Image (cartoon, rainbow, N blue to C red):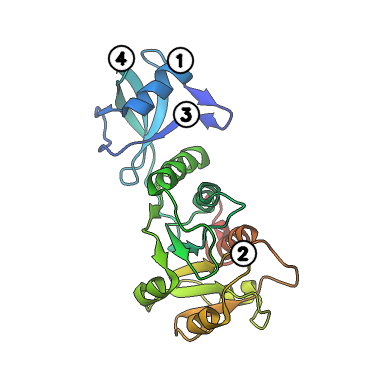
Amino acid sequence: MADLTYPGGRLRLFVDAALAEGAQVETSPSQAHYLVHVMRARLGDQMALFNGRDGEWLAHLAEFSRRQTVLRCTERIAPQTVVPDLWFAFAPVKKTAAEYVVQKATELGVRRLIPVITRRTIVRKVNPERLAANAIEAAEQSGRREVPVIAEVLALEAMLARWPQERALVFCDEAGDAPPIADAVMALRGRPSGVLIGPEGGFEPTERAAIRAKGFACPVSLGSRILRADTAGLAALAVWQAVAGDWRVTGA
């Protein structure tokens, strides 16, 4: 048997089916096309499968046709892991596709992504199916063993109303009168959290006041330089992971 590989290593696929020794998994038509026509897979070729529940499994191509392939699990090669309880609420921005933000947030270990519409948000429509597909692809390529949840698009007011009171909301406040993010996140270690980033031009004053009025809100500063909205969001996620997340765990 030969491993199917791409530049990142052994090919990995996300599937919905239960995984166990001897389990047979029927792929979707798009996965079948990818395996047979893009990767040129042959009977017996190996890859890794994960479903977010049963760990990661080595499987081989047992059957294939033009529209469907059957993979058979042989052994579990890694246990199921859980990423830190971090959410990311972001306003889609015009110059950076929401798909890109979802990809990078998935790589950074976010558990749940929430597109948020604010008063200054220019891009007001996103494609949930495309976002989910990008999250799956990023999980496959980054070594994650689960895929983040893509929540429904919410107006800022609705998101704040639904936000769990016990979950800290790290609010990237461009006003500059908040503590440095690393200091603020240090105090949140062990607490479920989320990061909120605004659109081009930032939040309106009334929105900023509404966020800061919430008891769960934790305003933070990202320093003296003016960052684009997408840069600020990913930077904040990286800081959170470095200070309070699984970047503190060797080999996580």
Q: For the point 54% across and 52% down, which residue is it?
A: 101
Helix, strand or loop for disc 4: loop
Mark 1 surroundings: few (<14), some (14-19) or many (≥20) residues within 10 A: few
State the CA–CA distance, disc 2 to disc 1: 43 Å
Q: Secondary structure at mark 1?
A: loop
Residue 40's tag is: 1
Residue 190, visible in the rendered structure:
yes
Nearer to us in this view, 224 or 72: 224
Q: Earlier along the polypeptide chain: callout 4 or callout 2?
A: 4
Cα distance between the residues tagged 4 and 3: 19 Å
* Residue in front for this viewpoint, 1 or 92: 92
The mark that comes first in sequence, 4 or 3, is: 3
Badge 3 is on which residue?
11
Residue at figure coordinates x 49%, y 79% from the top left = 217
Q: Pointer 2 and pointer 1: residues touching (CB < 8 Å)?
A: no
Dot 4 or dot 1, earlier in sequence = 1
Q: Position of residue 176 (x, y in %)?
A: 68, 79
Asked if residue 2 can be seen in this view, the reply is: no
